[in-house]
Image: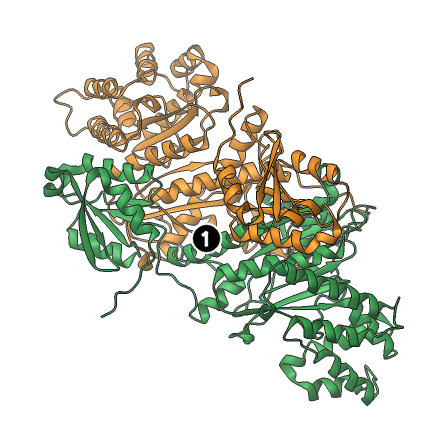
Chain colours: A green, B orange
Amino acid sequence: MITPRTPSGVLELLPAEQIAFQRMLEVIRAGYERFGFLPIETPAFEISDVLLTKTGGETERQVYFVQSTGSYEKAIAQAGGPGTSTEGQLPELALRFDLTVPLARYVAEHEHQLTFPFRRYQMQRVYRGERAQRGRFREFYQCDVDIIGKDELSVRHDAECPAVIHAIFSDLAIGAFTIQLNNRKLMGGFFEGLGVSDPEAQARVLREVDKLDKRGADHVRTALTGPTLGLSPDAAEQVLEFVAVRSMEHDDAIAILDRLAPPGSDGTALAQGVQELREVLTLVRALGVPESDYRLNLSIARGLDYYTGTVYETTLDDHPDIGSICSGGRYDDLAGHYTKSALPGVGISIGLTRLFWQLREAGLVDVAKSTVQVLVPQVDPDLMDATLELASTLRHAGINTETVLDGGRLGKQLRYADRAGIRFVALLGPQEVQAGNVTIKDLRRGDQFTVPRDDVVRALRVELAQPLVTAPD
Amino acid sequence: MITPRTPSGVLELLPAEQIAFQRMLEVIRAGYERFGFLPIETPAFEISDVLLTKTGGETERQVYFVQSTGSYEKAIAQAGGPGTSTEGQLPELALRFDLTVPLARYVAEHEHQLTFPFRRYQMQRVYRGERAQRGRFREFYQCDVDIIGKDELSVRHDAECPAVIHAIFSDLAIGAFTIQLNNRKLMGGFFEGLGVSDPEAQARVLREVDKLDKRGADHVRTALTGPTLGLSPDAAEQVLEFVAVRSMEHDDAIAILDRLAPPGSDGTALAQGVQELREVLTLVRALGVPESDYRLNLSIARGLDYYTGTVYETTLDDHPDIGSICSGGRYDDLAGHYTKSALPGVGISIGLTRLFWQLREAGLVDVAKSTVQVLVPQVDPDLMDATLELASTLRHAGINTETVLDGGRLGKQLRYADRAGIRFVALLGPQEVQAGNVTIKDLRRGDQFTVPRDDVVRALRVELAQPLVTAPD
């Protein structure tokens, strides 16, 4: 007998939780599709050489390699042989660690069969050999959306990410949220103005700035003026002022941007960044995102070696501790390792497994509603045929229906339905059959009524369409 | 520069195909949910010891092991050390090769948190180190549905599998199909009557019988009477007669069953199998499956070491060459390696990747319809705000809408929509804005009309709900 157990670092859900998770996946999918994105899926494993082209040491340490029994045995056997070196001998296959590298490979591989701008969404699990730790996952869902241009992609597309994110997080109904925007050119230009023009040094400063929320301004000030970064106290102060800029309203944001790039600054990276952000913010408003739900935040840095323009983060207003639940940005070159074509893009990613886990920890996951809408109990074994016909009628009408086939006391069957989150019971006893009726019980409201057999679909449809309103006492 | 490419044995789809694939997944999911099955998902990798408990040599050779970089290097280094043996040292993790073993592990692990009968569906990819070959996949979707009892599970549940399969394949609309049923007890009892009571010998005979469709009766007859199996010519003839029984109608099937178990055969495995099949066939009819769509077929054997009662296969009437597109059956003990609880169950599986590939090969996959329902082109850059507001209005109404943000000639934008399978265009030019109108073009029907801006959602909803009827010439 082997103890049944899952590997550490995976989130396996019970059905009630899985239903809640599935609902979130469906809301995200529907949101992406509503904005005209097309689905793709890629294999869980890629050829190792192809997957690991793009990434440096840190990610590679986290990659999971995949080997069939035969090739594993062969590698071990070869390693045991005299004078063999294993250096550089990687297994042929590796699990994807994100959806960005597979997207780059996909677009480069199928470049001539795709229409650009290529608008794709992808919702799949990714794999990372993280150290086992609470809230860290080795397998987790990413829900990505990207727009890829060929040679060029108008900055207007940068406004679509906040719009789709706004639609999705509104539909998910997990509380108020704020989409925060910044622009890497603007940041870079600002740093150049301070005399920090080496991108590496900028990156180091930004990494310190990234700790602002966690460690506080004093810590960051000390680090910025310390021996490693060597900013003057005045420059450090300017950095802290800069990243403290957070606008609450659209017009306020535009005013801040105007101050950042005064007349005469034309042609600088700063001015270009300001111009891009201004256009993006304006289109975000035109796309119907309410002003209360997005904001300029010059402290947002994101993936330092990857993003080149607009960057996004999204936070839950009532749960700032959760951190960003959806991030992304604009990049200049998606697939430089795979194709000579310039493929600029912009995209965002929702890490759904981590988000779900956090919502569950915070008690915000509703697991009270089954996918099953109606239970047809077994009142009398002699009525099996009529019972199954009733279930068929309901299913033909598109109503999710479970039948009890094993029997047992009716009270127990009803308690099962209640515990399982099945709201309605369609009951067919001898009396009902005699009279040509069906009794419908609403377990949540705690009442019941009888309808003619021919009317049961219509009656249940009315009930199912009607949200539960608690009656006043 | 690295050539972007996928590993062999995976099916990666272009967006139009992925949309068709996704539709099939959604039809299957909706079907499973309509019959009251609950979703679960399990991790792609399991602990190797847990995964490989149940299976014999053949499957183990096909398992993919998973290792992080560190543990791979360690295994290689250890193998290189003096005097080390690698025997029995498997990597810690392995990719699932089906959904049945993970289900067994899941039910055993969460036994005390589940309600029985446990009705679950699961639609995920599985991994097998198959030899690369056309139509053989190393990664493929399985869409499984199972009902698991604790200690016992009424044979009535065996009727639910054909019912849900019938609903799903009707909705998939890939042509006429037939669900074929048999019973392993019936087969076993029949063989005992011939004097072949050793289960191993029965299995060998059944393996020969399995070749009937491919190799023909003569080949099978020769094999059955050959030195290995050693049946008498008379017994071989009886076997061939037995497996040739295929009923076309329900009453015909019941009559055949009655003949197979004449009065006096009570208590034999044959009689029990006949009784089970009779009950299942009767309930399949009560569940509304038309008699033309299922049939008794005594030649169906399926997984010889696993199934113990009802077995199913499903074939497409117009494509018998494709073989069974959905198979399964009843088993006595799901999780004997993980728990002492007796967990009998019944289930079926759709191998969707292979089915999709076969349908595509046969030209039966419709890739002409995008998930995008409406394109909002860019007629005039000065109207960007009004254009985006129109798109927002449509999206708020739940209409999947793509906007053109990069501009270009209108004719090119319309051709793009047509090629991409987007049927409707909602056009806002200077004239439309002036008059407060929107022009709607139906690219498939090739006509257009103008509606007031406030009426555009209603008008498009009417169009989208209305299937395309080709006008008579």
Q: Nearer the viewer, residue B350 or A5?
A: B350
Residue A60, given in percent of the width and then of the height, sits at 70, 59
Q: Is residue A289 left or right of residue A243?
A: left
B49 w.r.t. B6: above or below: below
| Residue B152 location, quadrant | top left
B434 w.r.t. B416: above or below: below
A27 w.r.t. B100: above or below: below
What residue is shown at x 79% (from left), y 65% (from top)? A275
Q: Nearer the viewer, residue B169 or B52?
A: B169
Q: Nearer the viewer, residue A213 or B245?
A: A213
Tag 1: residue type?
Val
Q: Do we see residue A230 in this rendering?
A: yes
Q: Which residue is mark 1?
A: B50
Q: Is residue A383 left or right of residue A342?
A: left
| Residue A384 location, quadrant | top left
Q: Do we see residue B56 in this rendering?
A: no
Q: Is residue B267 left or right of residue A203?
A: left
Residue A330, given in percent of the width and then of the height, sits at 73, 59
Q: Residues within 10 Å of mark 1 (few under 14, many from 20)?
A: many
